[in-house]
Amino acid sequence: MYSYSLSPYMEKIQHWSRKWRIKFSAPKSSLISFTGQRRQQVEPMIFLDGVRIPNTKEVKYLGVTFDQGLRWETQTEIAIKKALGLKNLFKILTYSKHGPGIESLRTLYIALMRSKLEYGLIVYGASSKSRQQRLERIQNSILRTILGAPATTSAGLTYLGALGRGTGGPYPYRHNTLEIFYYHIVTSKLEINKIVTTRTGHIMSAGIDLSQKVPMLPQRIEPPWVAQPIELKYFPMTKMEAISNSAAAKALFHELKSNLSSARKSYTDGSAQQDTGKTTYIPSLEVEETGTMRKGTSIFTAKAHAIPRAMEITYGHDEWTEELAILTDSKSVVQALESPNNASHQIIHTIISTAGNLKSAGTRTTIYWIPSHVGSPGNERADQLAAKESLNLIPTKEI
């Protein structure tokens, strides 16, 4: 049952790790099943990359040891062991001829002793009363030592002397105090919102909108010494040369396609007729995506927006891509990418940022400028889709 329920989530973890090239070790991982039953439970079989994750009865997380039944036996023993290790220290400091005073001992107790007893107390503070009493006895013993009280002093008088200096209290008292403290932190945020609303009522009545969104700052521009995550290349012929010598252009296109045989190729384009449309065409993924831009959008912006969309589609695909080659017939966009710090269009920085994310995932991105209408089937298909979109022949949502 557990294995069946957890399998989809394990697959998501594996997919994420492959995309980001982070390897998880199943033998170094731990699987624990929390249950209140004392009888032997059937151990679930969970696999990570084909290797079974070993089952365990205890696991340590952020310094707190969790056991299957959440009875906190091991964690309590660890806290007791740490406390006993400090008990002799306080005896030496208290009875030394030139030892510190009570105030200094109080500070040391809070810093060294109470911090160890209270770490994770909200979690394991619900342990059995017998374990709580063991911790409390050690705490009382150290407090009596600090106060110079005899061993026969009652716990109540010990706490009275300690609490007068803000040192602590009974074990359950500290547990409840910490719970209330953290609860107050969470709820105080809600109270602050109520106070702000009350104190600013006169401002709101004046028609001033305090919730108005601040315009988003421009995307961070990388310093000049940071390497670009994109490689930019140009077709070796100008558009006029390619039109006048179509045979040579087709031969160069064939050579380019051969050089990019191992890369995932994406063709992007834009068109402005009745509306402004953009398209992203990725043959290997059978993707033909189009979209209509807002009224008044330039052809430059439309063609530029199609480029990061090709990156997003590639990034979101289950199959990892080693190299992505984006072919566009917009030379102005490629030229703008050569000098991004001087570019006034936000989309240029978006392209670079998206390529940076792909690079982090292990995918190289190359953007090629190619001339339009000179015999490239991929470019011709992208151009047809963009033209249909701009003529409202393909129903899509406005972007």
Image (spheres, rainbow, N blue to C red):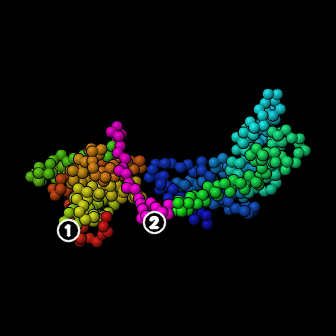
Q: Is residue 77 visible?
A: no
Magenta highlight: main SS = loop
Instruction: Name the image quarter holding residue 308.
Output: bottom left
Q: Secondary structure at mark 1?
A: loop
Q: Which residue is mark 2?
A: 205
Q: Residue at x 60, y 50 (%)?
A: 29
Q: Nearer the viewer, mark 1 or mark 2?
A: 2
Residue 117 at x, y = what percent? 73, 46
Q: Earlier in the sequence, mark 1 or mark 2?
A: 2
Could you say which is closer to the camera, residue 317 or residue 121?
A: 121
Magenta segment = 200-227
Residue 321 circle label: none
Whether residue 21 is in magenta: the answer is: no
Image side of residue 152 versus residue 49, left or right: right
Q: Which residue is mark 1?
A: 274
Q: Residue at x 78, y 56 (%)?
A: 128
Q: Amino acid at mark 1?
A: Gln
Image side of residue 106 versus residue 327, left or right: right
